[in-house]
Image (tube, grey):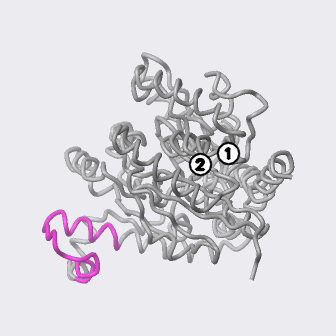
Amino acid sequence: MKHPTYRALHIITRFGTGGAEESVLEQIRALDDLGFTCDLAIGKEFNPHYLKKHPLPEHTQIKRIPSLVRSPHPLYDIRAVQEIKTLIRQERYSIVHTHLAKAGILGRYAAYRTRTPIILHTVHGTSMSTYHGLFRSWIFTLLERRAARWCDALISVGVDLQNILLAHAIGKPEQHRVIYTGMTLDAFKKIHYDRVHDYKNYMRRRSLALQKLQDIHRESVYNTTNPTPYETRHSAHQKAKHISDETSRHVLGGIQDPSALFVGMIARFEKVKNHREFIEMLRPLLAKRTSVYVVLFGDGPEIATIQELVAHYQLENNIIFVGHVANIPEYLYGIDVNCLCSYLEGLPRVLVQCSAAGIPTVCFDVEGAKEIIEDKKSGFIINRIPHSAQQSRHEFVHALSYLLDTPQARHNMGTHATHNALSRWSLERLKHESITCYRHYIKTKLQ
């Protein structure tokens, strides 16, 4: 059994299946290996299923903060600060490390008021963007400037984020650090390896992926025409098997056809991910090219709205809603080009994962994109042109069409993307830099 010297508390606003949550878990595991006891405080939004597949270290305890919610709420926010202060005092943490905007502000304040020796905050995304409106941007900028005074370090997951914070005069330059988010990329790397070195296995895995997509799409179409809200996904699948082959071929439009091409988008269904614009941009392309399919991974509050939009445009045959899946690499064998249309990101992990898989990307110029994608070398980054959304959309579709029409370009860009992803975004690098950061502040503040 370990005998930890220091106790640390990580605080996060919500815990689902996002990139911030994955980074937090990896940091906790790294610090556990170093001899720390790291507890994890989570706000009201908590999905425990991810932890069943990716368990925390033995010593780590989950602490719930029911009043910690994403949206501003004065009463809940005051309660959350009190709950966090009580927790810190009871457990006597030497280090408090906050994540995401709300937990970052309330958690840093609570740690500051309880005189916690070391206070760190990781910036996973910016809250100062004008996407949410000028007034909200101004308020969050003021709050972040104040909160920066309550902590020792501001850790950004990418250089773009760090530059945004500095441009908004948030924190002193010496407070800032960049620790690139790390992730396990072996399963993604295997896709590129098979495509280049074991093509027979690659085609076998691709066929299996396309069969899964075909089954999911058949269920989706079946449930669209015969809605059964209380029907389980399994029973729907069993009933869908009884659709005649002729109907299936008509409805599915040849997913298993060797000439079919697949465009993927892996993103939670929420407004900031911008699925609506993505569908509207691709509508003319899909109308002309029936052998192109769009595969949408993820779930979220906007999924029903996007499904209605797809039905309105009569694109059901060519757009596949996969939902949230844990085994994304198995499906990526069937994806030819990746797309991302978000208004905001921190550091888009999906771009790293697809790059490791050798899948070129077309995306808009969001935070972190240029740190992952080299424009015209490993994909295309499209600038959003102010007051000319139509031109930006045209450039996006043009770049996507080029990749769909040019197999050699897909191969060359995918290969280039893989080398970049594997050199910078490794899990080992995240662990090493996290441990180095902690050791620095322990040496300067606790020893």
**Residue at horizontal 35 percent and vertical 52 percent from the top:** 290
Q: Is residue 113 visible?
A: yes
Residue 360 lies in the magenta-colored region: no
The numbered dot on residue 185 is none
Residue 216 lies in the magenta-colored region: yes
Instruction: Residue under label 2, please give it.
Output: 98
Image vertical order of residue 253 relative to residue 100, above or below: below
Amino acid type at image mark 2: Thr
Q: Secondary structure at mark 1?
A: strand
Instruction: Residue under label 1, please give it.
Output: 119
Viewer-proximal residue among 76 and 19: 76
Image vertical order of residue 229 relative to residue 270, above or below: below
Residue 333 placed where, x, y %?
55, 66
Amino acid type at image mark 1: Ile
Q: Give the alpha-carbon distance from disc 1 to disc 2, as whole Å.
A: 8 Å
Answer whether labels 1 and 2 touch (C-beta < 8 Å).
yes
Mark in the foreground, 1 or 2 = 1
Q: In the image, 304: left or right of 344? A: left
In the rendered structure, which disc, 1 or 2, sits on the residue that comes first in sequence? 2
**Residue at horizontal 47 percent and vertical 18 percent from the top:** 386
Image vertical order of residue 312 relative to residue 230, above or below: above
Q: Main secondary structure of the magenta part?
A: helix
**Residue at horizontal 50 percent and vertical 36 percent from the top:** 344
Q: In the image, 290: left or right of 352? A: left
- Magenta highlight range: 215-238
Image vertical order of residue 386 relative to residue 282, above or below: above
Residue 9 placed where, x, y %?
62, 58
Q: Residues within 10 Å of mark 1 (few under 14, many from 20)?
A: many
User: On the rendered image, what quadrant is the N terminus found in?
Assistant: bottom right
